[in-house]
Image (tube, rainbow, N blue to C red):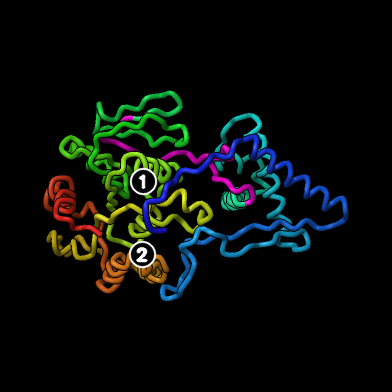
Amino acid sequence: MEGKRSRGRSQPRPRHLLTKIKEFTRALVKDLSDGRSPEILIHRFRNYCSNPSANCFCSSDLPKGKETLTLRKETHVHRLDVLLRVLVIVQQLLQENRHGSKRDIYYMHPSIFSDQSVVDRAINDICILLQCSRHNLNVVSVGKGLVMGWLRFAEAGNMFDCINRPNTAYPVPVHVEEVKDIVSVAQYILVVEKESVFQRLANDQFCNTNHCIVITGRGYPDISTRRFLGLLVDTLHIPVYCLVDCDPYGFDILSTYRFGSLQMAYDAKFLRVPEIIWLGAFPLDSEKYHLPHQCLLPLTAEDKRKTEAMLQRCYLEREVPQWRLELQLMLERGVKFELEALSVHELSFLSTEYIPSKIQGGLLI
């Protein structure tokens, strides 16, 4: 997982995917007509395990096992029903060259699907079966990411000129595969966890004095934000820094950008950004930047459980051991704090002092 690997892939054409769907359904029908219960093999992927000292193979993008779905198991019947219904919808989207959201798909059979997570699982299974990414199925998420700064690009024939208004938020493009003609004079990319921090930087005119691109996924990043970030890194070849709260959820969001998510481990090599550098906030930043005790919050029992679980992720020990030490230190200190706490000094402290001191002083990992 280490190194600057390309996130590009040869895009499966709709015609090719439709052929795969036809072959898959034809095999199912043949099994049923011959009196056999179909067996569907779905490879299983993971991007980490919970044994940091193990000589595991999680860094490989190969499958880590497989699951067999069959009508002979009662627990599989509903799952297969959902998978086939979603597959029919995907086939229709591809045939008609239309796009739909996961939520659109859910509402086509709400009484059968019962929950959005059921549809999400079926879409992931279909991606694994067809060996493609979700956007190849014409299934898109409603974009929530924002971008601003020294950047210009075209998407589907529309020009987005952030350079003319570098402190104005633009939506991250949903159809990243259609982004062309990227132009930038930025010196680095800054990823921030939350929209509130993004807006703080915009209000402080941060991009006027710092030639950079700022991106936020507004919490856990969606696929479009992660793909767009990867495209910028591959195209511009400039440093990419990440700024998150000093708490377990901030660290998990940082790890999602860096390593990908477990739920979409099958596509991690196209979504992760291994070049990302952690800018902060670190546990000892509360002392270095003189935060009052009132700005520190005690870790909750849930925070501690989440932190202890993250410490077991094998990729931390293998690839970013310093990150793991910082996470361990947060657990030992038993406190957390938000980036907004830096405003205790002055409203623009984050923009004028904290971020510049981090980048110029090399206070990052």
The answer to whether residue 215 is magenta is no
Sequence-wise, the earlier of marks 1 and 2 is: 1
Foreground of the two, 314 or 16: 16
Residue 301, by quadrant, is bottom left
Q: Position of residue 87 (x, y in %)?
A: 67, 43
As helix, strand or loop, the secondary structure at mark 2 comes to helix
The answer to whether residue 134 is magenta is yes
Amino acid type of disc 2?
Glu
On screen, residue 282 versus residue 18, left or right, reads left
Residue at image location 44% in from the left, 39% down from the top:
143
Residue under label 1, please give it: 218
As helix, strand or loop, the secondary structure at mark 1 comes to loop
In magenta, the rendered stretch is 129-152
Q: For mark 1, does the 10 Å Cα neighbourhood hold few (<14), some (14 to 19), or many (20 or more) residues?
A: some
Mark on residue 319? 2
Would residue 161 be visible to someone looking at this image? yes
Residue 341, by quadrant, is bottom left
Residue 318, by quadrant, is bottom left
Residue at image location 14% in from the left, 55% down from the top:
361
Extreme residue toward the bottom, this view: 53
Residue at image location 46% in from the left, 73% down from the top:
55
| Mark pair 1, 2: CA separation | 26 Å
Image depth: mark 1 or mark 2 in front:
2
Q: Position of residue 14 (x, y in %)?
A: 62, 35
